[in-house]
Image: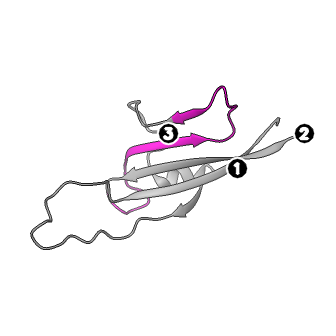
Amino acid sequence: MAVKRQQVLFLCLVNPELSSKTIAWALYDGASSAEDSRMETGDSAVPPYASVLDAMRDGWKVLQAPQLPYFMHGHENETGHLPWEYLLEREVETDG
């Protein structure tokens, strides 16, 4: 009997445009077994999708879009987290 499992994908983009280039990512695969638990941290040279729009075309749903960052005067050039992070999910069927 097929069971649905969730996969979660974080994509960080160059800018907030859904078609802009992916620069960092992480994939958590709830469909894999406990022994084969998979978490892809973006350690390969090629992201799973070039953009959020490409992931959407492959069946991923956007759960969260980034908020516009607020830069305080005098701190505009400080480094921090990647501001254009999107959270996506999809359900896949497994054998249980």
**Measured Cα–Cα span from mark 3 to mark 1:** 17 Å
Give the magenta part as a residue range: 15-39
Q: Position of residue 21 (x, y in %)?
A: 37, 49
- Give the residue pinned by disc 2: 1
In the rendered image, the residue lying farthest to the left is 74
Residue type (three-letter) at the residue carrying disc 3: Pro
Would you say residue 56 is visible in this rendering? Answer: no
**Measured Cα–Cα span from mark 2 to mark 1:** 15 Å
x 70%, y 49%: residue: 91
State whether residue 73 is above or below residue 30: below
x 61%, y 32%: residue: 37
Q: Position of residue 50 (x, y in %)?
A: 44, 45
- Mark 2 neighbour density, 10 Å: few (under 14) some (14–19) many (20 or more): few
- Give the residue pinned by disc 3: 48
Among numbered discs 3 and 1, the one appearing first in the sequence: 3
- Mark 3 neighbour density, 10 Å: few (under 14) some (14–19) many (20 or more): some
Hey, which quadrant is residue 24 in on the image? top left
**Magenta region's main secondary structure?**
loop
Would you say residue 76 is visible in this rendering? Answer: yes
Among numbered discs 2 and 1, the one appearing first in the sequence: 2
- Give the residue pinned by disc 1: 91
